[in-house]
Image: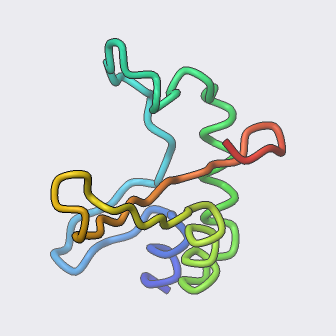
Amino acid sequence: MPKAARIGGKAHVNTAGKVVEVKSAQECSCQHGRQKIFRCTEFSEEDRQQLLAEYYVSGDYNRQRDFILNHTVLTNAVSKDTGRRKQRHIQCLLPLNGVRN
């Protein structure tokens, strides 16, 4: 039962004996200045709660990994410095109003 509670995002007691609270969406308090790539302000508190609920609803580790894989894109880019070294970039595309952003 404790493992199912942990995977489901529910309150549980961890292996150190400490009580872990229910997982909830945290308020966005980031300050990115001129960087607009994070687009934190586009997601309302309800949107964050909805995404968290979608992630934890299955209560299955494999389904949660599938959720992450379905909402990320891995791209390979050649470095401009050497021209030979590849760099991997992971882009997270979370759904907002039914559209992946």
Please name the residue shown 73% across and 39% down the image.
96
Task: Give the percent coordinates (x, y) of residue 14.
Answer: 27, 74
Residue drawn at 61 percent across, 65 percent down:
56
Q: Position of residue 31 (x, y in %)?
A: 31, 18
- At a point 35% along the width and 66% down the height, the residue shown is 88
Image quadrant containing the C terminus: top right
Q: Relative to 92, is 87 on the left or the right?
A: left
Residue lying at the far front of the rendered structure: 83
Q: How is the image coloured?
A: rainbow
Observer-nearest of 38 and 77: 77
Q: Residue 72 location in percent, x, y? A: 56, 62
Relative to 6, residue 93 above or below: above
Q: Quadrant of residue 69?
A: bottom right
Q: Is residue 64 above or below residue 44?
A: below
Name, please, the residue furthest toward the right. 98
Residue sitting at x 40%, y 69%: 12
Drawn side of residue 31 relative to residue 66, left or right: left
Q: Answer with left or right where residue 71 lies relative to residue 74.
A: right
List x then y, in percent, for residue 41.
54, 21
Furthest residue to the top?
Answer: 33
